[in-house]
Amino acid sequence: MLFLDDPPPKLVGIARLAASSDVLEAKRQVEYLELETRRFIGRGSGRMSSIYTVNPYRGCEFGCKYCYARYAHEFMELRDPELFERKIYAKQFQSAAFRAELRRLKSGDTVWMGTATDPYQPAERRFQVTRQMLEAFADERGLDIGVTTKSDLVARDAALMVRIARKNRIRVHLTITTLDERLARLLEPRAPRPELRMGAVRTLSQAGIAVSVLAHPVMPLINDSEASLDGVCEAAVRNGATSFSAAPLFLKPCAAKVFLPFLEQRFPHLVRRYRERFEKSAYLKGHYPEMIAERVEKIRTRHKIADRQTPEWPMADQLELFALYSAK
Ligand code: SF4
């Protein structure tokens, strides 16, 4: 890591217990609700019009500090950005309605699960909406399905995905921003540890499912060193992933509301630089994104791994898709 002089000590003994009690306390504040849904499958527009989106949950308990999806709760008049991670809505699953929507898709269509919120967040253990949707996908054919998650719970569905893959294409994208457990706990407080996510890469790959590892977002002076990105890529390859990618952070106002106070608390020496860089635009421009692209390409070449095998899908388009989905 570039932002501290010394590597952080591993949490052991009582320090580890204290850290996990913070997580348990936060978990106690989470409220789960069910949400009636008119449509389960959303659709992009313009050059993204062939992409369909599925998000079984609104809100996400993982609470990543950089999460840009928080503003979705504002559509429901939930303006405190923290409510995004404390009030979780599971879509009330109706198998017949979902299957009817699926039948309207054409062979070759791309359907992406988890464009807005994580389909394998803890609510999935209780509601199993993602699982039920995948059961329906297993009866379809010819679809190109992507699943994006930060949770090792996805490995639960390995056998089901194998069934889906007999008649469709399916690829799982595991987001792993760092292998540093302590840093991951700061950035993604209630997401499974990187080691567990890497375990899911292995389980799925061994089952024959195509897996990509995404080291998004790359945050300047936090997880952007060559050593950090190389470590994630190397572990991804070792565990069977077939593609790797990493793109710089973008900071929409809804994400900045949480991310900048987080920086002030945990990385105060970076606040001024982040404010300057993101003041005029949510996107990093100029030399930095080019440098990261070159760095990632070099790492991919070193480990002989492909770029993500997905339709090109920049973050801005994800937001566009998300807005469409949220408006439904
Ligand atoms: S896992 Fe994704 S949706 Fe959930 S908080 Fe993190 S970035 Fe947001």
Image: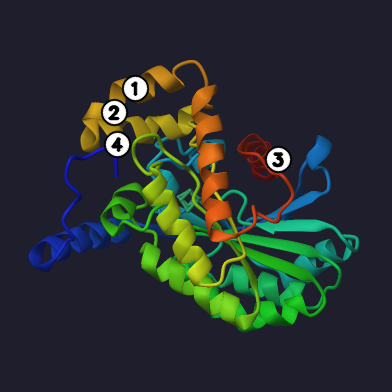
Q: Position of residue 178 (x, y in %)?
A: 39, 53
Q: Which tag, 2 or 3, sits closer to the chain's start? A: 2
Placement of the C terminus among the 4 image quadrants: top right
Q: Which dot marks residue 270?
A: 2
Q: Which tag, 1 or 4, sits closer to the chain's start? A: 4
Q: Who's the residue at 83% across and 48% down the image? A: 50
Left of 117 or right of it: where is 134? right
Left of 24 or right of it: where is 207? right
Disc 3/disc 4 C-alpha distance (Å): 29 Å
Q: Position of residue 31 (x, y in %)?
A: 40, 58
Pointer 2 and pointer 1: residues touching (CB < 8 Å)?
yes
Disc 1/disc 4 C-alpha distance (Å): 14 Å
| Residue where numbered disc 3 is placed | 324
Whether residue 111 is visible, yes or no, is yes
Q: Amino acid at mark 1?
A: Arg
Nearer to the camera, 220 or 192? 220
Relative to 39, say whether 283 is above or below: above
Left of 7 or right of it: where is 193? right
Q: Who's the residue at 41% across and 38% down the image? A: 219
- Closer mark to the observer between disc 3 and disc 4: 4
Disc 2/disc 4 C-alpha distance (Å): 11 Å
Q: Which dot marks residue 262?
A: 4
Disc 2/disc 1 C-alpha distance (Å): 6 Å
Q: Which dot marks residue 273?
A: 1
Q: Amino acid at mark 3?
A: Leu
Q: Who's the residue at 37% across and 35% down the image? A: 258
Pointer 3 and pointer 4: residues touching (CB < 8 Å)?
no
Disc 1/disc 3 C-alpha distance (Å): 33 Å
- Closer mark to the observer between disc 1 and disc 4: 1
